[in-house]
């Protein structure tokens, strides 16, 4: 029992010493920043990998769908389902990526930026408390809906609409005199039912991507916030 108390006291003293020694604290924060930056880069790579899978699968299916008039048009709808699955995976990965990016941004905005120009002051006066709390109990910073909306706006909305246009063109190009309603049928489902389902799906993803809301993601590049370098000399 006594040894546990002594260990706790020693660890508390160690924390106090690190906090009081500026050089030691700077070294610790520097190592922490490099570690968080490495984690952010790793998760950024995972996001890019998911996008690559989406584009590869999409290109392969489109190539096969247009290779012969005998190939069914609904294979493009299978591609829509596959790309949507990758969207869900990437949205989940983006939430993890945002955890490490938010920490990196805390370092950049309050440590590096203040060191370069102390006259501007700290962005968050309690940033070390925030970072300490996040290290003690890591939590995601954004909702799944916000993550999905972000990935839709950045990448997946364009991919899905390319698939929609490809499906419409595939149905009409090889209709051979049939009406769109007949040519778009899938099994026992009429072309009208298929078109309604596709329309509802695209309406939903469009609402998700464009729905106005306060964003919790910190440190993103955002439109309307361009800032040019000041030219001197």
Image: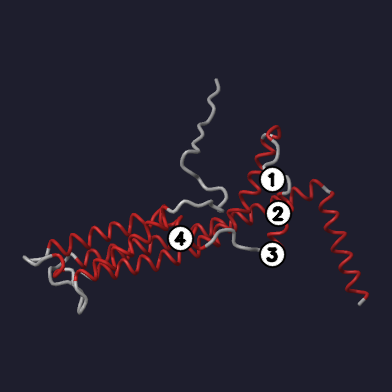
List the residue tagged with mark 2.
Answer: 130
Q: As rendered, which of 156 and 178 lies closer to the eye?
A: 178
For marks 1 and 4 on the same chain, the one whose residue lies earlier in the sequence: 1
In the picture, measured across the screen, residue 95 lies left or right of residue 196, that is right
Residue at the extreme left: 177
Per the image, label 4 sits on a secondary structure element best described as: helix
Q: What residue is pinned by disc 1? A: 124
Residue at the right extreme of this rendering: 2
Residue contact at pointers 2 and 1, CB within 8 angstroms: yes
Report the residue marked by disc 4: 148
Closer to the N terminus: mark 1 or mark 3?
Answer: 1
* CA distance for labels 1 and 3: 19 Å
Residue drawn at (69%, 61%) of the image: 135
Secondary structure beneath dot 3 equals: loop
Q: Which residue is the site of mark 3?
A: 137
Q: Residues under labels 2 and 1: Cα distance?
A: 9 Å
Dot 1 falls on a residue whose secondary structure is loop
- Alpha carbons under labels 4 and 3: distance apart: 24 Å
């Amino acid at each position: 029992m006594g040894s546990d108390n002594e260990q706790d006291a020693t660890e508390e003293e160690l924390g106090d010493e690190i906090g009081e020694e500026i050089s030691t604290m700077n070294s610790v924060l520097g190592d922490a920043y490099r570690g968080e930056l490495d984690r952010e880069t790793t998760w950024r790579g995972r996001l890019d990998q998911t996008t690559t899978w989406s584009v590869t699968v999409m290109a392969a299916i489109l190539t096969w769908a247009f290779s012969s008039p005998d190939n069914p048009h609904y294979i493009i709808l299978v591609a829509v389902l596959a790309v949507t699955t990758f969207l869900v995976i990437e949205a989940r990965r983006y939430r993890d990526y945002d955890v490490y990016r938010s920490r990196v941004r805390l370092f950049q905005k309050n440590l590096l930026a203040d060191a370069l120009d102390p006259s501007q002051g700290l962005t968050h006066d309690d940033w070390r408390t925030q970072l300490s709390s996040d290290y003690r109990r890591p939590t995601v910073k954004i909702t799944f809906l916000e993550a999905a909306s972000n990935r839709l706006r950045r990448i997946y909305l364009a991919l899905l609409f390319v698939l929609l246009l490809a499906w419409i063109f595939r149905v009409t190009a090889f209709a051979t005199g049939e009406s769109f309603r007949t040519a778009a049928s899938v099994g026992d489902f009429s072309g009208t039912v298929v078109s309604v389902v596709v329309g509802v799906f695209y309406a939903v993803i469009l609402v998700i991507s464009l729905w106005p809301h306060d964003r919790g993601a910190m440190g993103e590049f955002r439109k309307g916030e361009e800032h040019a370098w000041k030219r001197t000399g």
